[in-house]
Image (tube, coloured by chain):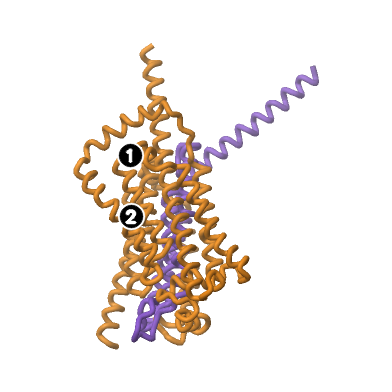
Chain colours: A purple, B orange
């Protein structure tokens, strides 16, 4: 029982570590690493499901009858390459965020955003007041 | 339990425990450089785990992607964004609460899962026996993973290739920089000073590049018979080019490798893949039904798999090269702008 479900438990633990990093850490690079851990835990889950006791790698050889399930292998193989491509897009976004805000810490970015919004509101307010003054004149 | 199985399950436990340990270390580390290197080790160990689980194709991919390219990309990004993490945490207690509750529910869910290696698990009872027993007659390729990837599920793989191509376009849209000719000389001088220092490294690594490319081609064309295929070959080929860029600098590499050509190859790979499907439609079969490509169905299957793997390899290799060139080019652009700003401020001070 312990050995039979050990892989699944490790998958859950890894997945939760990844999730914790994504929720609690503010640094965007760290969040991406957390996402990678989360993603890999799903890979481990699929590949563990494909395993058969006494089976070999799914490449046909004479004299072997027991092969592990090839379908999860196919799904995960393509998922890994797609994963790195999408991670690259995320990293590109982080580079642009760094250029625009000067930081990749989530809280500092939100702070700058809220300041920007406040000043924007103030500007609109001021300009409307000026307009009103003009009309009154 | 037999001796072999016992050792296998011991290796399994050791590798998975290492993964958990590394993941915990990643949570605690503040230095992002260490985090990225640990993530690379994490990728390598998960690749070893996939070998233990008999998933050799997946292990191949994970070793080249997880331990290779992704570490490299993150390192490039860290040089642009700074390598230390802010120590403040965003509501850590709430996060731990959410994580523990979700994890507990998932663990509760695992008690209904079939045990590891069980032959009668539901996953092994539907399409898998057909793939294992019939693929030799229907597709004629010893590597079942390649048969499923390129023939049974070719439409699915086509979708994945399109996603990779789209990601390449996304990176291009976000990071590409318009360069002016006259700026090249400034960059050359920066690069020369940097690369003269590592003469031995340069010469020894340069000798490895042709062998890496040859290995990539072997993986590409031997994918029908052993582990490998277009995805792995593409990544390995790209890593040879990236090694060249690391050794000789971006401006030299730009002269050797034409960026427009690489972008065309990326698009060509996707189109080529799709065209194989269209040709089989025109020959009277279904989309990606290779039986009609040739008079002999098995020869048609072989031809179809060869062609689409070639398309996959082209797209994956060129998208990886595009991604790396654009990240490195962005860094160069930032450095140059930084230098310009410095120069201007120096001039202002002088005046």
Residue B341 drawn at (x, y percent): 41, 25
Residue A112 as seen in the image, left or right of residue A65: right
Give the Cα distance between marks 1 and 2: 19 Å
B283 above or below B127?
Answer: above
Residue at the far left in the pictured view: B200
- Give residue B213's mark: 2
Residue in the picture at 31% in, 34% down: B191
B348 above or below B67?
Answer: above
Residue A3 drawn at (x, y percent): 35, 81
Q: Judge by depth and name the residue closer to the eye, B228 or A108.
A: B228
Residue A137 as seen in the image, left or right of residue B291: right
The reply to the same-chain question for discs 1 and 2 is yes
A18 above or below B209?
Answer: below
Residue B8 drawn at (x, y percent): 29, 78
Residue at the far right in the pictured view: A136
- Judging by the rendered image, the residue that carries numbered circle 1 is B249
Residue at the far top in the pictured view: B351
Residue in the picture at 22% in, 45% down: B203
């Amino acid at each position: 029982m312990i050995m039979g479900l050990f892989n699944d438990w490790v998958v859950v633990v890894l997945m939760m570590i990844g999730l914790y990093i994504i929720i609690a850490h503010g640094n965007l690079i760290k969040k991406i690493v957390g996402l990678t851990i989360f993603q890999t835990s799903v890979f481990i889950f699929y590949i563990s499901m494909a395993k058969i006791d006494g089976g070999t790698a799914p490449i046909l050889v004479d004299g072997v009858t027991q092969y592990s399930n090839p379908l999860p292998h196919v799904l995960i193989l393509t998922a890994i390459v797609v994963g790195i491509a999408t991670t690259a897009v995320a990293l590109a976004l982080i580079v642009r965020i760094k250029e625009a805000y000067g930081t990749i810490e989530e809280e500092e970015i939100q702070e700058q955003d809220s300041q920007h919004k406040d000043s924007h509101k103030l500007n609109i307010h001021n300009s409307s007041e000026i307009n009103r003054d003009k009309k009154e004149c | 339990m037999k001796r072999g199985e016992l050792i296998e399950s011991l290796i399994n436990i050791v590798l998975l425990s290492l993964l958990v340990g590394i993941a915990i270390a990643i949570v605690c580390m503040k230095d992002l450089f260490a985090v990225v290197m640990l993530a690379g080790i994490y990728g390598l160990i998960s690749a070893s785990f996939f070998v233990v689980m008999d998933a050799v194709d997946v292990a191949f991919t994970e070793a080249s992607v997880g331990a290779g390219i992704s570490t490299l990309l993150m390192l490039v990004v860290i040089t642009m964004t700074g390598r230390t993490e802010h120590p403040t945490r965003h509501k850590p207690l709430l996060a731990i609460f959410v994580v523990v509750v979700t994890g507990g529910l998932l663990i509760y869910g695992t008690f209904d899962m079939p045990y590891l290696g069980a032959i009668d698990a539901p996953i092994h009872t539907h399409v898998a026996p057909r793939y294992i027993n019939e693929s030799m007659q229907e597709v004629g390729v010893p590597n079942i993973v390649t048969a499923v990837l390129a023939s049974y599920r070719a439409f699915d793989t086509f979708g994945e290739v399109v996603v990779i191509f789209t990601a390449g376009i996304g990176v291009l849209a976000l990071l590409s920089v318009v360069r002016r000719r006259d700026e090249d000389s400034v960059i050359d001088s920066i690069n020369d000073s940097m690369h003269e220092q590592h003469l031995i490294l340069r010469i020894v690594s340069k000798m490895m590049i042709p062998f890496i490319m040859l290995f990539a081609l072997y993986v590409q064309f031997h994918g029908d018979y052993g582990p490998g295929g277009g995805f792995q070959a593409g990544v390995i080929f790209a890593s040879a080019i990236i090694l060249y860029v690391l050794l000789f600098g971006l401006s030299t590499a730009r002269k050797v490798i034409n960026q427009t050509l690489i972008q065309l190859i990326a698009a060509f790979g996707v189109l080529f893949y799709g065209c194989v499907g269209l040709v089989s439609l025109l020959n009277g079969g279904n989309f990606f039904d290779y039986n009609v490509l040739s008079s002999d169905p098995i020869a048609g299957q072989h031809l179809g798999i060869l062609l689409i793997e070639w398309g996959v390899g082209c797209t994956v290799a060129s998208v990886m090269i595009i991604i790396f060139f654009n990240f490195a080019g962005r860094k160069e652009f930032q450095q140059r702008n930084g230098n310009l700003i410095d120069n201007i401020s120096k001039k202002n001070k002088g005046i």
